[in-house]
Amino acid sequence: MILFQQLLILALSIVFLWFGANYLVESAEKIANRFGVSQLVIGLTIVAFGTSAPEFAVTVSAALKGQSSISVGNVVGSNIFNLGFILGLVALFHPVASSRKLIYRDGFFMTASSIILLIFFYTGDYTLSRIEAVCLFILLIVYLSVLFIKKEAIESDELITKTARWYDFLITPISIIVIATGGQLLVSSSESIARMFGISEWVIAVTIVAAGTSAPELVTSLAAAIKGKHDISAGNLVGSNIFNILGVLGVAGAINPLVIEKTSFFSLIMLITMIVTALIFLRTGWKVSRKEGVALILCGLALWAIDFIKM
């Protein structure tokens, strides 16, 4: 009976996620047009931060409870899931186009952020201190400042069809709330089901919880790709990864120093491997093809299998 209830909650969460993502993409595009900024910047910021709301809620909540494994595991697992399963799955529906700025500016910053996180944990005896966490958050502020001070203009190939009306500024936050609610429902139901089968805390964090909190990125990037908004689709995933590392872990680590097991450190190395692989695919031909999408999904499955084997 309990299992049946959790499955119903799971189904309800998917409905919340899809409707929220659909309206978020539409309203975000109109807002980008209204202020004359590119869809890539909107995808990297408003959309990315909105879809990362579940990661933020779960990670900070775990930090407050002293559950470092869930805090770090959720972010690491979500970032791997974003560039493995989500980017790969979206590419199966439609090749995901990229751009020079996405690769050399945002992709570089995403890679550098992940390497800095790995160095902090390695030099700190597998602990992220409060000072290091604050440094991560400062890096996020620097990144956002670069994006908005330059105020990257609308690209010439972005056809402006609609601009934001007053109600679009309400639809965007409401969509984010709906997505966050759906993500939370998905996480709670998935975690309950996983615990019924005796899965460990770290594995739950980097797989079940990570997949659940990444569900908003999945439906949002998929909805954007279907609508032909590739800058929002790809920018959402890269921006979410940057926000997860610098913003989510920055806040969580400032609340409580985050400690991970020595065996869990290998997952950080796997994350960097996945990032480099995804960027290579995005650079070749300036798009992720369907074949490369399959390869990314297989990489994601392989990394999941490694975590389960280590369990």
Image (tube, grey):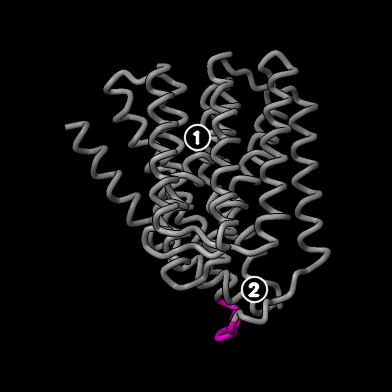
- Outermost residue on the left side: it is 1
Give the Cα distance between marks 2 and 1: 30 Å
Q: Is residue 200 left or right of residue 121?
A: left
Can residue 171 be seen here? The reply is yes
Q: Quadrant of residue 122?
A: top right
Indicate the amino acid at tag 2: Ala
| Residue at 38% in and 36% down | 301
Choose between 205 and 268: the one closer to the eye: 268
Q: Earlier in the sequence, mark 2 or mark 1?
A: 2
Numbered disc 2: secondary structure? helix
Q: Tell me the residue that label 2 is attached to.
A: 32
Q: Tell me the residue that label 1 is attached to.
A: 77
Q: Is residue 293 left or right of residue 157?
A: left
Q: How many marks?
A: 2
- Outermost residue on the front side: it is 284
Q: Residues within 10 Å of mark 1 (few under 14, many from 20)?
A: many
Q: What range of the chain is rendered magenta?
A: 159-167
Indicate the amino acid at tag 1: Gly
- By secondary structure, the bulk of the magenta-drawn segment is best described as loop
Screen quadrant of the N terminus: top left
Q: Is residue 245 above or below residue 132?
A: below
Q: Residues within 10 Å of mark 2 (few under 14, many from 20)?
A: many
Residue 45 spot, x, y in % from top left: 65, 58
Can residue 216 be seen here? The reply is no
Q: Quadrant of residue 4?
A: top left
Choose between 10 and 214: the one closer to the eye: 214
| Residue at 55% in and 43% down | 277
Residue 16 spot, x, y in % from top left: 37, 56
- Is 126 included in the stretch rendered in magenta? no
Screen quadrant of the C terminus: top left
- Is 160 included in the stretch rendered in magenta? yes
Numbered disc 1: secondary structure? helix
